[in-house]
């Protein structure tokens, strides 16, 4: 089976909702993956910020294998030791979290977060406090409540009516946020860095102002760290850079290095309102996912997170140097989440040319290339990635 036959079979049977490259990936190891034709790539997108320890990290493989022989799933009718251990590990050192709810994806974690925000306010005797303030150009997932908060109309088309009670404000605009918060606001949901908007970091001080304003207004502060969490930015959670504690935070993507998992982290006060029967997930907290996630946290805390900072600094330096091609306007992001801003060339074309050079990255819109490599990327791999992107940029046709 080669790329061509797999792609043809896939196109005939899978729903056409993805714009997929004509490549089938069959194997991975660290930051390298191989396609069905035997071609090797340096993977700097890692399943969209998912494989934080690269592909098939031995510690995660060992944890999954051992767990697969012991116990997979028991439902939440019972406790299982891995879920308890993982919840303990997640709240350890957290600026705010004392309670954890497990689910299976980022959208589900946000769905739980938004539902809990409303329930918290209703339980306090304020059912009229049911509005959610969210940001324009945000991305929170594809389930209806998460989609309704997602501030990009292109994702809404055809799916209306949306969940009522959501209003959007420009990202980073403190005055707009102040104006939107009021006696009907349940919560403000925000990403510390808007990933799908083209790797857009919050302006300095924005999260702290959001904390103060939501508190004054009696609204909850919800951070969507689905993309920025689990070491992606060089700290375990991106909000740690600002020292700003939310009331609720969603996590998913990298949490189990590719095993599907999501988590909602909550303060004691708010988390207590997810009372028996109010919310649930059949697969949530299943032992396989929790075992994988425990292995991820152990490796990150065992030095991988710290090591990633030096390599990300080097990667940024090398990407910045590509300004010399005349086709890079700048680089923005934090840690191992970086957006390369292009000028005069189309991001889609550059991504294809990069793939031909043996580099996997993705385009956000027509002018940003996203790098979300493994946190375990080596300095030599960072250099190679920049070299390959440079070759792609030089080969790209000028955009008219
Ligand atoms: C990817 C992402 C989501 C959605 O996660 P899924 O696992 O695809 O449901 C939500 N929020 C942010 C910030 C994301 O990057």
Image: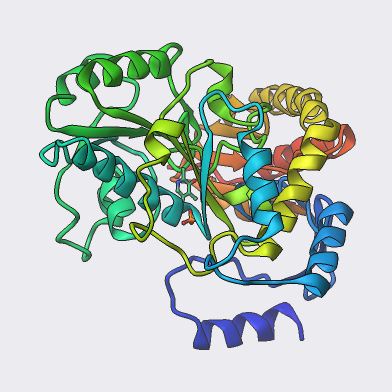
Q: Is residue 329 visible?
A: no
Residue at 70% in and 51% down: 293
Q: Is residue 29 visible?
A: yes
Report x, y in % for residue 56.
82, 59
Q: Nearer the viewer, residue 216 or 207?
A: 216
Residue 347 drawn above or below residue 258:
above
Residue at 70% in and 56% down: 81
Report x, y in % for residue 290.
68, 56
Q: Nearer the viewer, residue 351 or 108?
A: 108
Q: Is residue 353 left or right of residue 400?
A: right
Report x, y in % for residue 222.
38, 34
The C terminus: image quadrant = top left
The picture quadrant where one finds residue 288 is bottom right
Q: Is residue 69 left or right of residue 121?
A: right
Q: Nearer the viewer, residue 371 or 64?
A: 64
Residue at 59% in and 59% down: 285
Report x, y in % for residue 72.
70, 72
Q: Is residue 329 left or right of residue 5?
A: left
Q: Nearer the viewer, residue 268 or 244?
A: 268
Residue at 24% in and 22% down: 177
């Amino acid at each position: 089976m080669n790329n061509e036959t797999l792609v043809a079979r896939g196109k005939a049977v899978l729903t056409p909702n993805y714009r997929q490259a004509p490549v089938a990936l069959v194997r991975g190891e660290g930051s390298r993956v191989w396609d069905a034709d035997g071609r090797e790539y340096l993977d700097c997108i890692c399943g969209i910020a998912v494989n934080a320890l690269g592909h098939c990290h031995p510690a995660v493989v060992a944890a999954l294998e051992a767990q697969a022989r012991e116990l997979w799933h028991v439902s939440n009718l019972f406790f299982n030791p891995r879920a308890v251990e993982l919840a303990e590990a997640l709240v350890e050192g957290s600026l705010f979290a004392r309670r954890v709810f497990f689910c299976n994806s980022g959208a589900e974690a946000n769905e739980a977060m938004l539902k809990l925000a409303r329930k918290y306010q209703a339980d306090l005797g304020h059912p009229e406090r049911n509005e959610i303030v969210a940001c324009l150009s945000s991305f929170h997932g594809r389930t209806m409540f998460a989609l309704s908060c997602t501030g990009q109309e292109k994702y809404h088309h055809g799916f209306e009516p949306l969940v009522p009670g959501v209003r959007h404000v420009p990202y980073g605009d403190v005055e707009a946020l102040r104006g939107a918060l009021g006696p009907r606001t349940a919560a403000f949901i925000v990403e510390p860095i808007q990933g799908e908007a083209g790797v857009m970091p919050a302006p300095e001080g924005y999260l702290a102002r959001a904390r103060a304003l939501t508190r004054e207004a009696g609204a909850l502060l919800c951070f969507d760290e689905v993309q920025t969490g689990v070491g992606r930015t060089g700290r375990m959670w991106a909000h740690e850079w600002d020292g700003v504690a939310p009331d609720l935070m969603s996590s998913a993507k990298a949490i189990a290095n590719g095993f599907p998992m999501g988590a909602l982290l909550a303060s004691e006060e708010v988390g207590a309102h997810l009372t028996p029967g109010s919310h649930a997930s059949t697969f949530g907290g299943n032992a396989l996912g929790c075992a994988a996630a425990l292995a991820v946290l152990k490796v990150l805390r065992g030095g991988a997170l710290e090591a990633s900072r030096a390599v990300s600094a080097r990667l940024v330096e090398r990407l910045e140097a590509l300004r010399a091609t005349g086709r890079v306007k700048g680089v923005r992001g934090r840690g191992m989440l970086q957006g390369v801003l292009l000028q005069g060339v189309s991001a889609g074309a550059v991504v294809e040319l990069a793939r031909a050079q043996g580099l996997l990255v993705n385009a956000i819109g027509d002018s940003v290339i996203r790098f979300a490599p493994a946190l375990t990327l080596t300095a030599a791999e960072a250099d190679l990635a920049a070299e390959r992107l440079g070759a792609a940029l030089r080969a790209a046709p000028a955009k008219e």
